[in-house]
């Protein structure tokens, strides 16, 4: 269910539900998932229930669900231990922001699932931003980053907040000058990149560190690898709902539990300020207005609140939202429909979601800051001295 009620007087649409069962049938070779689908003129059949025994016997789970594969390497910037450690130090160093207050970890805190626990992020000068901080756990597998997908690589994702005026409010020139004033950074960049510190190489180092932030060893991963005792009965019932009645697998599929696509969910949030147009700001396609990227569900229990604007504070609220078919929005995705889950089913579904929590990545704790020279860094010509101290 993407981190994104039907009126009782209006009957739920049936034809779209039929298409969803076609989709679920295509996602798995387990024909027991669906009955033969009748014509559109007759009410669609509901899926035959999968038993836990049937689930345990599946060689492959629907929707490509499975354990995390090895992290795809960066062809342009292959990692090594020195580059990763440099990236770790940069990730936790507040000197990368203009006012020396925020680091990458301010919004991506290891103690909060590499998000920040806020409905909306806090940017430069303590100003609240329009969106929640997405977690960078397992971001190495994404082909699009940020809620609107404006970055296609981890390097772009690392560089963007550094330069954004509303976030860390840095510039390439000032970042280079500031890091060059730190002898250890100078030595480290020289050893890793063969030159003085630059914005581009800082982003490459941070991305190398972020590629290590993976969580492959949760209960679900053990189950998917063949240990059928790794999930409890409740969690298995939740998995059956996830791939069946609740239809979560339509958007949350593959080993990372995300399609990395953009959907308008009908979230009637109360974010202050102008309308957040989401993906539309990047694509210019009117169909993308109000659509946001499907987040991974891995480690979802660690990073409340939920949705792009932190509308919901708990997983229970999120499940209730999907169960009622979202909020009233004539342009919401046809993949959002009323589910009719019982309280027990909701509990089982949440139990399964909690089984997606993996082991914390190695080396994800703050690094001690490198020393600063006693002489202040010079300000490049034409640059304001805002925030330097």
Image (spheres, helix red, strand yellow):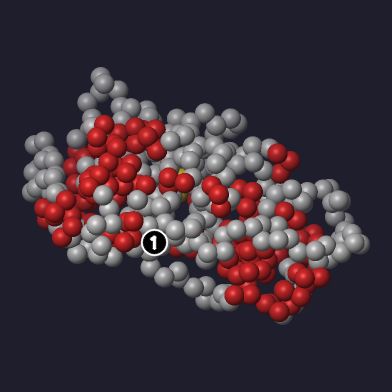
State whether residue 115 appears in this view: no
Is 144 in front, or is 373?
373
Q: Residue at x 32, y 44 (%)?
A: 351
With 96 as the anchor, is 26 left or right in this view? Answer: left
Query: What residue is pinned by disc 1?
Result: 217
Asked if residue 10 is positioned above or below residue 239 in the image, the reply reads: above
Quarter of the rendering containing residue 166: top right
Residue 46, how many percent across, how many down?
13, 41
Asked if residue 182 is positioned above or below residue 320 in the image, the reply reads: below
Structural crowding at the residue carrying mark 1, measured as other residues with C-alpha within 10 Å and reported as few (<14), some (14–19) or many (≥20): some
Residue 92, how many percent across, how many down?
66, 57
Q: Residue at x 40, y 50 (%)?
A: 297
Is 385 in front, or is 11?
385
Q: Residue at x 48, y 58 (%)?
A: 360
Is 287 in front, or is 337?
337
State whether residue 50 appears in this view: yes
Quarter of the rendering containing residue 368: bottom right
Q: Residue at x 87, y 61 (%)?
A: 377
Asked if residue 42 is positioned above or below residue 22 in the image, the reply reads: above
Residue 223, how many percent across, how many down?
28, 59
Which residue is situated farthest in the top direction here?
A: 9
């Amino acid at each position: 269910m993407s981190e994104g009620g039907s009126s009782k007087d209006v009957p739920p649409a049936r034809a779209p539900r039929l298409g969803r069962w076609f989709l679920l049938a295509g996602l798995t070779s387990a024909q027991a998932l669906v009955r033969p689908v009748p014509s559109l003129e007759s009410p669609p059949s509901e899926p035959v229930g999968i038993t836990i025994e049937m689930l345990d016997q599946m060689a492959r789970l629907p929707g490509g669900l499975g354990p995390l594969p090895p992290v795809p390497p960066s062809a342009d910037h292959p990692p090594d231990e020195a580059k990763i450690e440099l990236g770790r130090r940069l990730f936790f160093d507040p000197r990368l922001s203009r006012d020396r207050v925020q680091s990458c970890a301010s919004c991506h805190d290891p103690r909060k699932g590499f998000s920040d626990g806020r409905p909306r992020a806090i940017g430069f000068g303590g100003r609240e931003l329009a969106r929640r901080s997405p977690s960078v756990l397992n971001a190495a597998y994404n082909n699009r980053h940020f809620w609107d997908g404006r970055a296609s690589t981890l390097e772009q994702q690392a560089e963007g907040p550094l330069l954004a005026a509303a976030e860390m409010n840095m510039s390439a020139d000032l970042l280079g000058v500031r890091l060059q004033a730190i002898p250890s950074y100078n030595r480290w960049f020289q050893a890793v990149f063969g030159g003085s510190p630059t914005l581009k190489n800082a982003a490459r180092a941070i991305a190398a560190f972020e590629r290590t932030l993976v969580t492959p060893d949760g209960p679900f991963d053990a189950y998917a690898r063949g240990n059928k005792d790794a999930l409890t009965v409740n969690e298995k019932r939740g998995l059956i709902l996830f791939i069946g009645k609740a239809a979560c697998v339509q958007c949350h599929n593959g080993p990372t539990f995300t399609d990395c696509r953009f959907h308008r969910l009908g979230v009637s949030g109360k974010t202050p300020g102008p309308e957040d147009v989401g993906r539309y700001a990047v694509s210019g396609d009117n169909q993308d207005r109000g659509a946001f990227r499907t987040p991974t569900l891995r480690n979802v229990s660690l990073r409340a609140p939920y949705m792009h604007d932190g509308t919901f504070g708990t997983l229970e609220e999120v499940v209730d939202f999907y169960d009622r078919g979202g909020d009233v929005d004539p342009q919401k995705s046809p993949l959002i429909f009323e589910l009719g889950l019982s309280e027990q089913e909701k509990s089982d579904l949440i139990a399964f979601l909690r089984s997606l929590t993996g082991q914390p990545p190695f080396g994800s704790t703050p690094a001690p800051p490198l020393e600063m020279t006693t002489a202040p860094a010079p300000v490049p010509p034409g640059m304001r001295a805002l925030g330097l101290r």
